[in-house]
Amino acid sequence: MKHKLSLLFFCLCVLSVQALRAVEAIPLNRGWKFHHGFQPVNEVLTVDLPHTWNKGDGMYADADYYRGLCNYTRKLAVPAEWAGKRIFLRVEAAQTVADVFVDHRFVMQHRGGYTAFVAELTDRLTPGKESELTIFVNNAARMDIAPICGDFNMSGGLYRGVELLVTDDDVCIAPDYYASSGVFFTQSEVSGQSARLKMEALLSAKASSLDGCEVEFQLWNDGKQIHSATVTDFTPEGRAVAETVVERPHLWDGVHDPHLYQTVVILRKAGKEIDRREEEIGFRYYEADPEKGFFLNGKPYRLNGVCRHQERAERSVALYPCDHDEDLDLIQEMGANAVRLAHYPQAKYVHQQMDRRGLVAWAEIPFVNVYVTNPAYDENLEQQLTELILQNYNHPCILAWGLFNEINSGWLDRPSDMVKRLQALAGRLDPSRPTMGASNQLDDFNGFTDWIAFNRYFGWYGDDVRMMGEWLDKEHAAHPERKIGISEYGAGASVFQQTDTLKQPAPGGPWHPENWQTYYHIENWRQMQARPYLWCSFIWNMFDFSAAGRREGSDMGRNDKGLVTYDRKIKKDAFYFYKANWNKKDKFVYLAGKRAVDRTQPVTTVQAFGNCGPAELWLNGESLGKAVPDEVNVLEWKDVRLREGKNELVLKNKYGEDRCTWYLGSRNL
């Protein structure tokens, strides 16, 4: 009885939602039966999506995690009213290979764990009857699907959600064109005076023709419709195309003014609306100059960014919108204006929020670390790039497409030809945007993408922390025509490992004191901010994340280079250093080294960060005077003598204060 009631409730929900719009998206996120393997040999669980089976492994001390086949199954009630409609299944992401079955009949396979895919189920479902939907998902390592490997976990599951798309007619705006929205807006010749906009919609008709169909393109700004065009002639592929010129466009200006226009695309048949799409777009123009760096809308706009993995402590990769919001809130609190979505396409919701917040997105495919000359692997790279571009085509936050990260690290197969193929493909799919790559090589393929950036870890993986500037100047001099940036730099840090002496730790060792990370970032940023030819710099990483192969720091299976801990609860000292340099709105002062409570050095340097001028330091009630921030907003008081036992430090200026307690020797004194 309970099962029948749940099916009835599902049908009623479907019918009520159907009445609201011609084409509806119906979530299928609740009540999946899940088990490991092809057939249930152990416990069958009931799970809701988003879901990953690796939430409990590969994240903490147990650094091994299950990589194999799992099964998701649920009943699918199909109301009789759906007769004559088309039904599509949309899966937002499945790591890594997904095989879809309806009533044990194969429908399709999708290869790649980070992009959406759509399967049409119309011919597999019978209106008025119930079917069984099964999705086998397999995250086993493969040599023909990107990424082959990587310094991050590839957690399996239906970890972004599933929905049904139900049309009102045989004709619709194609939802299955590489799982894109089916509508594309291409801007060109953008300036403060005008912008040209090409508008396209791809139609799909399963049995009938497009006779009697028309597509209306609407453009709205601040609640007012500013343009409308109706198209009745379609290309042989079923594409409707229109163009317009927007006079004096309100530009999308990054974090300063992320202004968005609203677009509405309406498909009508015999005068009746049968489908529509609504998208937000933003007009902007930009360039990377090899000498002067990055410009947005004609003005210098240095991209101060962070890298981000889509993962966190409580849920691994099965994230909710609130998780993405918290990450973006922390990123913006620190003052970053760009995010590298590493090393794979991330959730659609993230791009939507970055559009609205004005954050520039570095979006890339998982072409990571190695290349093998396997034709199936080549095909998969091109498939994943196609899906990345078409699924995210309309987002103004994306200014360039990332083609690779650290490929050819010690492998014999050369990636150059593949990078050239991807470069050409990106140019065909989206001629409005440049391409970029993240390289750790001094190699020929660095010149294939339009922009290039480098992953450099001077002061962590060997070498001296002060070598960044020297290396950049040499690379810039050797290739003055290249638009270069820094795509990764960082150092590990455990908030549970503290010391008041400064010594470079072994990166693969168990001791990752926080103060070395702080020093590393101060010195690296000091060098990078003084070089205007850099178009970007991206910190590795904004948050600690799981990496099963690592045995270092205080947590096994963890990359601890984040500026915020894995659970998002503790902001490390380096977070506040960048906040002092990048966030000019939140006035604050911050004492570094507060977690290094137990001190061994009676004479020390007290360090602080602030973005609001001089600050005064008190030690045990006695003023040690004021310090003035240097060129990277570091304040220091040198040769400070601590007393035995308890020491109270208070830092303040007219905008704020900070305090901490240190102990020299015994805490009982």
Image: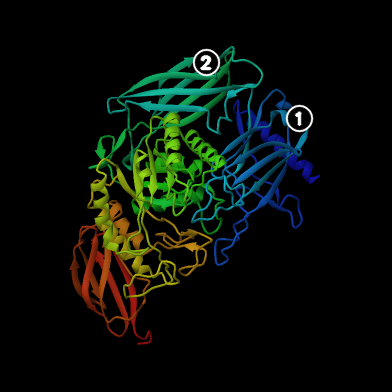
Residue 490 in the image, given as x and y percentages of width and height: 37, 59
Q: Is residue 260 visible?
A: yes
Q: Residue furthest right?
A: 1
Residue 412 in the image, given as x and y percentages of width and height: 47, 50
Label at residue 126: 1
Label at residue 628: none
- The residue wearing badge 2 is 234
Residue 130 relative to residue 55: left or right: right
* Above or below for 632 versus 235: below
Q: Nearer the viewer, residue 169 or 464?
A: 464
Residue 192 relative to residue 427: left or right: left
SS type, badge 2? loop
Residue 604 in the image, given as x and y percentages of width and height: 26, 76
Quarter of the C terminus within the rendering: bottom left
Cα distance in 3D space between marks 1 and 2: 32 Å
Residue at 56% x, 18% y is 268
Residue 137 in the image, given as x and y percentages of width and height: 65, 47
